[in-house]
Image: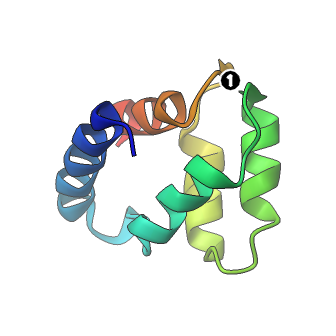
Amino acid sequence: MPTNLRIDLYQWACIIQRRGNQKMSNLQEELGHIKNHISYPASKQQVVEACNNMSDVPSGDKEWVSKSLPEQTYRAPEDVVNALLRKA
């Protein structure tokens, strides 16, 4: 895992702990999906569609990603994580 993604994961975990009910419920697994199961570059629509096709991702987490992820093209998993960090 790239070093900069590790830093973002720590930051994301800290933010999510403060978010309460709107947090993503299975952070490590879902970050693995962002990193390993989406082909980059990817648009928001492609990221959301990939997320929606993952049966192990809770519906509340899918909804949060869909609402929180800005419209843009993401060149790497780190871009998705950083965009979600800014919305958390």
Q: Residue 66: x and y, percent? A: 66, 47
Is label 1 in a helix, a strand or a loop? loop
Image quadrant in which the C terminus is located: top left
Q: Is residue 83 above or below residue 24?
A: above
Residue drawn at (60%, 45%) of the image: 67
Q: Is residue 9 left or right of residue 54?
A: left
Graded by Cα atoms within 10 Å as few (under 14), some (14 to 19) or many (20 or more), the crowding at tag 1 reads few
Q: Is residue 62 left or right of residue 3?
A: right
- Depth check: give the residue in front, 24 or 29: 29
The residue lying at 36 percent from left, 30 percent from top is 86
- Above or below: residue 55 compared with residue 3: below
Residue behind mark 1: 71
Closest to the observer: 71 or 36? 36
- Name the image colouring: rainbow
Point 29% across, 39% down: residue: 8
Against 51, residue 82 (above or below) is above
Residue 83 in percent (x, y) is at 46, 30
| Residue 61, image x, y percentages | 56, 65
- Which amino acid type is marked by label 1? Glu
What residue is rendered at 53% in x and 35% in y?
A: 80
> Number of labelled discs?
1
Left or right: 42 as drawn, with respect to 81: right
